[in-house]
Image (cartoon, rainbow, N blue to C red):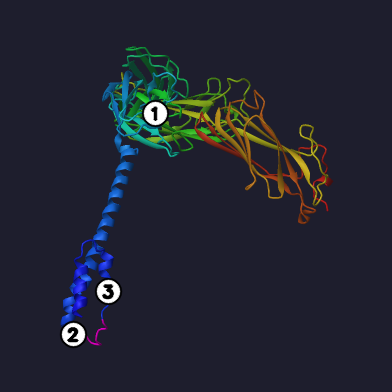
Amino acid sequence: MSEHLEELKKRLYKSGESFDARLRRPELTPQPQKSPSVWQEENRPILMEPRRSGKIWWILGAVFFIAAIGAGTYYYLSYNSISNKRIDISISGPDGAIGGERVTWEVAITNNNNKALSGVALVFEYPAGSRVLDEGVKGLRARKILENIGAGQTVRLSFSAFAYGFENETKDVRATLEYTPFGSSAAFSKEELGKITITRSPVGVSFELPREIRAGQEIEIKVNYVSNSSSVLENLILELAIPSGFVFKSADPKPDTGGKTWFLSPLNPSEKRIITVRGILSGGELEEKSFKASVGIKDSSNGFNIYGQGVATIELKRPFLEVDAKINGQDTYSARPGESVYVELMYKNNLTVPVENAIIEGVLSGRIYDESKTKVRFGTYRSIDKRIIWNSSLNNSLGRIDPGESGTVSFELNILEKIPVKTTTDKDFNISMHFEIRPGEKPPGYEGADLKGEDSFDMKLISRLQLVRRGFYYSKTMPNTGPIPAKVGRETTFTVILSLTNSTSDLDGVKVRAFLPPYMGWKNKIISAEPVTYDPNTGEIIWDVGDMKAGIGYTSPAKEITFQIGLIPSANQAGQTPELVANITAEGHDKFTDSNLQVSVPSLTLKLESDPKIDLRQTTVIK
């Protein structure tokens, strides 16, 4: 055994001997069945330790190699990739501006990446309400194509506009960079937000009016407006918000719509103007009433951009003699043609002494009520001057009104069923009512005082929207086919005509809706000046009429739509008169009275009442 051990030692320490060769077990004589433990402990370090140490070094080398490759790859990708974090966008411009002042913003884009940006575009959003000065820009968004921005390159762009808004309003400015990296179809973006504050409104608005008045008295209000802008202001609108209890009488200049809106001519820098409004203001003792005037422009979405606002408040004092009118129990009211309205006046003596032989008078103006049917309780109507009168000879309660005492008088009006609409100017009808109470004799101590009490009321007339439906088999406009009377299993077509008329006010948002039952077919033959849609899933037909001027169907032709439908009767419909078109309705908004209108007509059936050639035998389905 000793010679074999010597040979093993020589091989272990032999220069150039391979690691694997060293691990080769020498050819020894067979060991005994049970080896001494001392021999095992002496030989285990010699045979096994080199094997374990080599494997660890091999693993460590492999890990180092992989880590080196990963680090190199990461550095390469990081160095050559496009990162949003290495793109700088800045917006330079003033923090504040006077309304109407010209403002210029500079946008700087710096590409700190090691590669160029491609497919580059910059979208700049001006502050809301601005008037853009840059050429070729529509609306408030400018888009500029930059194509490429090189590595380390800075691009600067400028944008200009007149900035508008009310005082101390802060508005946003936004710049968004869009780009597509080379070799990629994905789009990326980065944005920057800026702000600007309107330090002074472009239009100054103020009021001139008394600090207090007696309720029911006529009041004159002056609205002053002046341009603070350095440029001409165009397309301005002044809107006057009036308190409840105010009845508009007149204005100079006249308003464009409803006593509340004026379309102003161009306003030069520093130019001042005045609008004077007169009316009667009613309300309770010490009640405060506020008026607000806003000047601005309408934007593309029909919103209102305010350039200036003014508010004024007036306090009401209780009148010596008080009268308060209500129509059908309401302070404001709009009536419909053919309606009967009930007007009640409450009167009261607020003096500290009795009032003798009081007189209450009401003056009416308007031609939409039937004078012959006017009913006055304990009073009289004088048609020569359209005056209603109550006095002590007709109403005993007016003979003496003690301090703090109150009472009521009333009358009834009947609105005409058919309003005389003859010309295009016959529109926006109303009845103006002015009421006054005064003593027959001045009480002692009040000889020089104005003791009368007043109240006014405007009752507007709601326009009449009318819908007519007609059905035909025999039609020259849109000829029909198929058997008549309709036969089970065979298709018969019919022509439907829907007509709309509008009487006294302009309408908007007018739509007509109808439904085809499931057994009916839409033939897609239509004659209409307005859009028409059909939903095959629900059977709904929508005729989008839109705006309707007053007098359509009276002073100008009615709106009409013609379309064709088909009926294939089922066996269970034999002997019946099925519906052809159901749930026919029209809706719209009355702009004068701010009322929503809706009207419906009965379903169109196989009876076809409008077709003169159809007889009773042809109105039911046959087998």
Overall secondary structure of the magenta section:
loop
* Label 2 – label 3 distance at C-alpha: 19 Å
Q: For the residue marked with disc 1, what is the amino acid?
A: Asn
- Amino acid at dot 3: Arg
Q: Residue 158 falls in which quadrant of the image?
A: top left
**Residue 32 lies in the magenta-colored region:** yes
Residue pointed to by mark 2: 36
Give the percent coordinates (x, y) of residue 175. Answer: 35, 30
Q: Amino acid at mark 2?
A: Pro
Q: Please tell me which residue lies in front, 510 or 388.
A: 510
Q: Which portion, as a residue range, is magenta?
A: 29-35
Question: x, y percentage for residue 52?
Answer: 23, 67
- Closer to the camera in the image, 154 or 78: 78
Task: Determine which of the numbered discs, if any, sits on residue 148 in the image.
Answer: 1
Find disc 3 in the rendering and name its residue.
25
User: Of label 2 and label 3, which has the lower sequence position?
Assistant: 3
